[in-house]
Image (cartoon, rainbow, N blue to C red):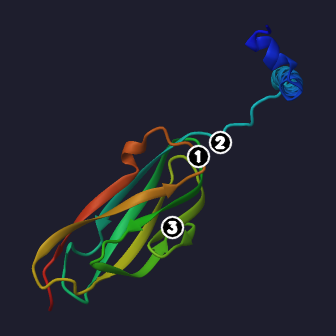
Amino acid sequence: MRSMANLAWSSKPLKEAFQNNWRMAGFAFALLAVVVLVGRSVQPAAAQGTADLEITKEFANRNTVRVGENITYLITLTNLGPDTATDVVFGEALPDELNPVSATCSQGTSLVTGCYVESLPSGDSVTATVVVQAIPNSKKERRFFNYAQIISSDTYDPNMSNNNAKAETKFIGPT
């Protein structure tokens, strides 16, 4: 009487599957060896650098607004270094109570509520002036927060704790 192992091994499809898998395992091992050997001689790409980016936000005119009135925020991005920051996008995330009116940048390209800066050397700053208008969502007085943030940067930022800022705005209803 044949054992189950002998019976399974005598099956032609199982024997071919094992041989094919063995060949694939050998190929995979050879490929791994090539990757390891070649990998030792490959140098990593140059680092993009490091830049601690800081964002602040303040009111240019006032923090209390009525329906239809404009309010202006100043959002300042500062590169605390040590390297130049590249391809930085920063700006304002508007709540439902505010509509964008305009945005201008002291350097770079203006976006709807922020800026794109191709290059910001260590120690330099760029300011976005964002004008928004209050829209009628409520007749009651209320307060809300809106946030400015660094949306993206190609340069590594080791300190993410200073990459957003908030401002409290008071909505006092219709005029």
Q: Answer whether labels 2 and 1 touch (C-beta < 8 Å).
A: yes
Structural crowding at the residue carrying mark 3, measured as other residues with C-alpha within 10 Å and reported as few (<14), some (14–19) or many (≥20)? many
Q: Report x, y in % for residue 61.
A: 26, 75
Q: Which mark is drawn over residue 128?
A: none
Q: Is residue 107 left or right of residue 64?
A: right
Structural crowding at the residue carrying mark 2, measured as other residues with C-alpha within 10 Å and reported as few (<14), some (14–19) or many (≥20)? few
Front residue of 30/166: it is 30
Query: Gap between marks 3 and 2, in whole Å?
Result: 21 Å
Counting residues from the N terminus, which is met first, the one under dot 2 or under dot 1? Answer: 2
Q: Answer whether labels 3 and 2 touch (C-beta < 8 Å).
A: no
Callout 3: SS: strand
Q: Which residue is mark 1?
A: 155
Q: Report x, y in % for residue 63.
A: 21, 72
Front residue of 16/42: it is 16
Q: With respect to residue 28, does 99 lie above or below? A: below
Q: Report x, y in % for residue 35.
A: 83, 26
Amino acid carrying mark 3 in the image: Cys
Q: Which residue is mark 3?
A: 115
Callout 1: SS: loop
Q: Which residue is mark 2?
A: 48
Q: Is residue 144 left or right of residue 155?
A: left
Counting residues from the N terminus, which is met first, the one under dot 3 or under dot 1? Answer: 3
Q: With respect to residue 25, does 98 lie above or below? A: below
Q: Quadrant of the N terminus?
A: top right
Q: Is residue 21 left or right of residue 134?
A: right
Amino acid carrying mark 2 in the image: Gln
Callout 2: SS: loop
Residue 56, quarter of the rendered image: bottom left
Q: Tell me what residue is drawn at x 75 percent, y 36 percent.
A: 45
Query: Gap between marks 2 and 1, in whole Å?
Result: 6 Å
Amino acid carrying mark 1 in the image: Thr
